[in-house]
Image (tube, rainbow, N blue to C red):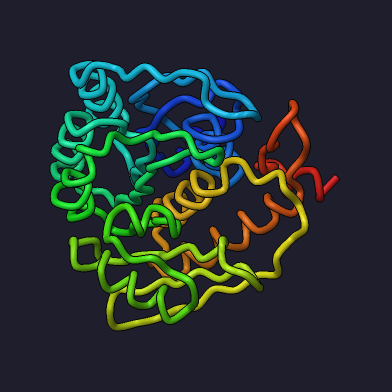
Amino acid sequence: MSAPAPIPPRVLTVAGSDSGGGAGVQADLKTMLALGTHGMSVLTAVTAQNSLGVQGAWELPADAVRAQYRSVVDDIGVQAVKTGMLSSAVIVDTVAGLLAGTGAPVVVDPVGVSKHGDALLAAEALDSVRTKLLPVATVATPNLDEVTQLTGVTVTDEAGMRRAAAEVLAFGPRWVVIKGGHLPGDAVDLLTDGDEEHWLRAPRHDNRHTHGTGCTLASAIACGLARGQDVPTAVRGAKEYVTGAIRAGFALGGGIGPVDHGWRARTAR
């Protein structure tokens, strides 16, 4: 008899659906597959979304979110969880409570707006993100716009990234990645826990098709943590993966196309 196939690390995304397939749960699951893990999902919202923007969004009831989560975690188990679009205070509160009792590493991508500037988190939910979600995060991954939403800090340079990191860490995550991709020059991110600092740099690629970068980075970090990597190792690997995905991003529809989650497989052909 053949030996049973090994079970890959299990990673759960708790996020909204992107019908265009470039971000959200769809991007998360593609990333998890590309990085050799078993992806699972809890849908928090359904969006009508394409390369031009978000045309509509419908939040799921908190009971539906809770039932999906318990169904997966209680039977299958999980080695890491990633959160994305949570849309409202009641969903944030529900998810934060579930995460607090799970015992797996948590990557929080505090999604506030889409790539096109469409709001994906109600303003009244920000306090719940600060006081309930970020305290259960192993790693938080805000971009510069999300930093401003959460802290009021406007970042214009690398010194500002360090100040922003301190502000976000004050809410309780163990580590924070301040994503500086909107600054001029190389694409630089700062990973810190308040003591260690890791500046992660990559060349900037002249490619406008970058839809899904934030979801992809956070999911890739979760994959590393599920494999037992420490946070700096997981973040460095995720940065390498998302840099390649940005380089290979492709046109889709009439607007901003997605990053290429399968770029490594295509490169290997």
Frontmost residue, 123 versus 85: 123
Residue 75 appears in the figure: yes
Frontmost residue, 219 versus 35: 219
Rendering coords of residue 218 (x, y %): 45, 50
Frontmost residue, 172 versus 157: 157
Residue 192 lies, with reference to residue 151, above or below; the image says below
Residue 220 lies, with reference to residue 182, above or below; the image says above
Going 30% across and 26% down the picture, which residue do you hit? 72
Residue 227 appears in the figure: no
Residue 188, picture quadrant: bottom right
Q: For the N terminus, which image quadrant?
A: top right
Residue 22 lies, with reference to residue 225, above or below; the image says above
Going 42% across and 65% down the picture, which residue do you hit? 178
Rendering coords of residue 199 (x, y %): 50, 78
Q: Relative to 15, is 64 on the left or the right?
A: left
Frontmost residue, 179 versus 70: 179
Rendering coords of residue 228 (x, y %): 39, 59
